[in-house]
Image (cartoon, helix red, strand yellow):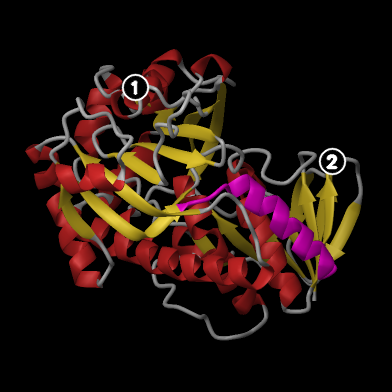
Amino acid sequence: MRVAVIGAGIVGVTTAYELGLRGHEVTVLERRDSVAAEGSFAHAGIVAPGWIAPWAAPGLPGRLLRAWCGRAGTLQLSSRAALTQAPWLWQAWRAGRPAAHTSGRQALWRLAEFSRERLLELTRQLELDYEQEPGCLVLLRSGRELDAARPALALLREWGVGHELIDAVRCRQLEPAMAPATRLHAAVHLPLDGVGNCRQFAHLLKAEAQKLGVRFRFQATVQTIDAGRPTRLRLADGEIAAYDAVVVCAGAGAGELLRRMGLRLPLLAIQGCSVTAPIRHLDGQLPLVPRAAVIDARHGVAIVRLGDRIRVAGTAELGRTGALPAPRALRTLYGVLDDWYPSAARTQAAQHWQGVSPTLPDGRPALGPSGADGVWVNAGHGEHGWALACGSACLLAEQISGRAAPLDATGLAATRWR
């Protein structure tokens, strides 16, 4: 089949590779001039199926209220966003009720676990090196935070997820560079989870896809999709191209492309940011940085080491359109870094990045047929795009190839929003 993939973020690149691997003639259309140039560029890089969860969760109304009043450091909500996104927020609240949240979290976990296995398989088969390191620690500063985490720990036990609840002493043995003065009550150790450079992986997999015959076209903006057999795409330069199938992996642009076809996919662009800085090397000492991935549960902020750099990432902003991170978000990131690894980074050389995570109200991606002839969807992964990309791509490629789904995809169908 002749297949077009719209978008060359991590989801689009992995989708193109999996389709090429199955013998399809694949063309990737990307509006930027490189792969992983937008939301996949500089996020935390954590692959942690064990701690993955939908954005909507119990207690969401309280979090939104505190954010609206300016009292939530990592979640920011403007008055304008509260009004314009009220239908989306209502759907998110409904999806965040306990029973729905547990079901959604299990669906995400199944996909994330499958995705990690596929990522490791590709890493071994293709001998890829993308600054990956195993291990993840979720830091709990107080007994109250541990109590709040107990329902999640119960689910990990129920689903057989490898993890260990450890005390502060054991945590600091695993991460000896952590600041001793910062209060730490306990931590969740996820030894099978880890971190890797998403952008670097995307470039490596792009090269492997090209070996399979996949064609990448950059600065190619798709304006409209005309479903049918064949499915026709109209590009911004006026070109019209026909394909047997089209996969929409266009990140934040997926919702608008589908809307023009009359299909509803309620994607909300949630902005997150990161700080990346060179590691500070002190004379005669090992660098005081995390060995792999650390997540501050209170703030939802991750600290990771990527090669000779340290990255701090997190925060969520609804309704903000600025190109640069908000000062308050940056203060949160620098504050968490200073709490745990105060001598880790040369912050005067830091780079700031802001990216968009296209998120559906229930926090799960939309995978599979769109409901329109010849059009497929692989979008809406939110902040978990890197953790879900390889599994989503494999699942969709099997579906397009007419094969049985390799895992239970209940709750992930793109048509659930029709």
Disc 2 target residue: 236
The image quarter in which residue 324 lies: top right
Relative to 100, is 386 on the left or the right? right
Reply above or below: 243 against 290: below
> Which residue is rendered at x = 71% and y = 55% of the image?
204
Image quarter in which the N terminus is found: bottom right
Q: Amino acid at mark 1?
A: Asp
Which circle marks residue 338 in the picture?
1
Q: Nearer the viewer, mark 1 or mark 2?
A: 1
Q: Residue at x 38, y 38 (%)?
A: 302
Q: Is residue 39 above or below residue 112?
A: above
Q: Residue furthest front?
A: 284
Residue in view at x 16 percent, y 44 percent: 169
- Find the magenta span and give its range: 195-214
Can you say whether 317 is above or below 140 in the image? Answer: above
Q: Is residue 248 visible?
A: no
Marks 1 and 2, Cα distance to the nearest angstrom?
46 Å
Is residue 130 at least partly visible in the picture? yes
Is-magenta flag for residue 60?
A: no
- Give whichever of 383, 133 is nearer the camera: 133
State left or right for residue 183 relative to residue 106. left
Q: Position of residue 57 (x, y in %)?
A: 26, 47
